[in-house]
Amino acid sequence: MFTAEDAEQALGVGRGAFLDAAERLQRREALLNPRRGFYVVVPPQYASWGGPPPAWYIDALMRHEGQAYYVGLLKAAELHGATHQAVMEFQVISAKRLPKIRAGRNLIVFYFRKNVEAVTAGTERRKTDTGTMRISSAALTALDLLRYPQASGGIDNVATVLSDLGQRIDPEQLGTLSALVERPVVQRLGYLLEHLGHDALTGSMLEMLRARGSLPWTELDRQEVRDPDFELEPQQRDPRWRVIVRRVPEPDE
């Protein structure tokens, strides 16, 4: 990985000469340009993919962007061993709204979080083939799956991932992080974890939630409420988490 400025300085050439050379290499599929001014060498074994895995360069790319980040959601869940569902995107939480990147066959998608730095305690460094990258912990991943439903594949998919991820979640960290997330997100996650048999994870989480004041009722799946063809009569009203359940989630076996 390198920037245009790095290459110009190392080669002793001007911007025009460098861009011409970079364009030739890109036509030969030997160089990838995922963001303006940032380049990734494509090893021969990844030529058919149009680029190496995003894990190889995401940390350098985000330093180039000057933005705090972490790899999260379904991709982080996969890295924590929840491999029940195929992950079609390389999902990144960023402190800035960024457009998605098509990098060869890989698709890098960014989801905005204003307070990325506030949840640093819920992230960890993971080794890659070229260095390290920052990923969300199992606890933060679980909260984010409910915070970004559009990225999580629906409530049944979230339940499937949580059924695998639950045993890797630190309950104390989950409680601490719950204070930094919107209350409805915590309510939905608490209900789902208990529904899936992970009751041991929710004690600190519920204490932190109740310390924030009285809880309004919230829908488990807001998409179902918006669907005009969906039966609106709730199947359950969970009094512990004050969650309205119109359809009980069905994780894949």
Image: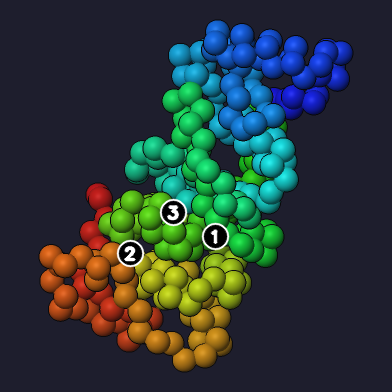
Q: Amino acid at mark 3?
A: Leu
State whether residue 234 appears in this view. Answer: yes
Q: Is residue 134 above or below residue 20?
A: below
> Residue 222 occupies which quadrant of the picture?
bottom left
Location of the N terminus by quadrant is top right
Q: Position of residue 53 (x, y in %)?
A: 54, 28
Cα–Cα span, label 1 and label 2: 18 Å
Q: Position of residue 124 (x, y in %)?
A: 65, 50
Q: Amino acid at mark 2?
A: Leu
Query: Residue drawn at (66%, 36%), measured in percent from left and top?
Result: 61
Nearer-the-camera pick, 206 or 16: 16
Q: Which mark is residue 140?
A: 1
Find disc 3 in the rendering and name its residue: 165
Element assignment for label 1: helix
Q: Is residue 129 above or below residue 133?
A: above
Find disc 2 in the rendering and name its residue: 196
Q: What is the crowding at mark 3: few (fewer than 14 residues within 10 Å), some, or many (at least 20)? A: many
Cα–Cα span, label 2 and label 3: 11 Å
Query: Residue drawn at (20%, 68%), measured in percent from left and top?
Result: 247
Q: Position of residue 131 (x, y in %)?
A: 70, 32
